[in-house]
Amino acid sequence: MPTVIFEGSDSPLDSWELSTFLRLFRTAYSQGLSVRASEEDLVRDPGRYVAMFDTGIPEKDRLSYFAEIFYTDFENEDLRIARIIKTSPLEISFIGVVSALTLAIILSGGKVELKNLKDLKFTLPPLGVGIKHLREALRLPLTGKKKRRK
């Protein structure tokens, strides 16, 4: 079961950052399912598969396209969380299609170490950095929390 380790996650988690990251990450994973590649090929030539990632995404109306795939039930290929450990650092163990997970990690600005298929190691930057990378990869507007009105 692939485990993702987040760098710089020593302090308490911001619930907005975690939920935003997971929403964007699931969207990238869902679109990544369309890129059928082996984990070895993705690690060897990520640029090729990142370019394939954009295939079929409309330039206009990206937000509704991503909303639709976010809410799609991919049945046995859906991304699921098997375990979350918040110590230092934050670790999330995912269950899903490893090639789509690998592509989502790359798009998040993460690092992938592939020693063999059973020993994948994923490292992601801090949540805020991952959100920025995912928004850029999905070409979505960069937004943050809005200040509370008084």
Image (tube, helix red, strand yellow):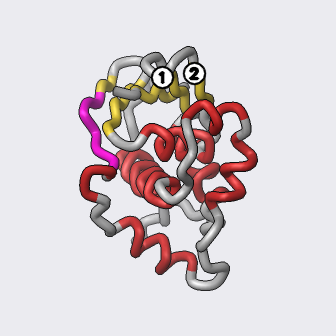
Q: In this view, does 80 lie to the left or right of 36?
A: left
Q: How many marks?
A: 2
Q: Residue 46 in magenta?
A: no
Q: Residue 82 in magenta?
A: yes
Q: Position of residue 47 (x, y in %)?
A: 74, 46
Q: Which amino acid does label 1 sit on?
A: Leu
- The residue that disc 1 covers is 117
Asked if residue 20 shows in the view, the reply is no
Give the extent of the magenta segment.
79-84
* Towards the viewer: 121 or 144: 121
Label 2: state its secondary structure: strand
Q: What residue type is labelled 2?
A: Leu
Label 1: state its secondary structure: loop
Which quarter of the rendering shows the C terminus?
bottom left
* Towards the viewer: 72 or 20: 72
Which quarter of the rendering shows the N terminus?
top left
- The residue that disc 2 covers is 114
* Towards the viewer: 90 or 43: 43
Residue with the most extreme bottom position: 60
Mark 1–mark 2 CB contact (< 8 Å): yes
The quarter holding residue 60 reads bottom right
Specify the principal SS of the magenta part: strand
Image point (48%, 70%), residue name:
66
* Towards the viewer: 59 or 146: 59
Q: In this view, does 98 lie to the left or right of 43?
A: left
Disc number placed over residue 135 in the picture, else none: none
Task: Give neighbour class at mark 2: few <14, some 14-19, many 20+ (Cα, 10 Å).
Answer: some
User: In the displayed structure, would residue 72 be above or below residue 29?
Assistant: below
The quarter holding residue 137 reads bottom right
User: In the displayed structure, would residue 51 be above or below residue 100?
Assistant: below
User: In the displayed structure, would residue 56 be above or below residue 122?
Assistant: below
Q: Position of residue 104 (x, y in %)?
A: 53, 46
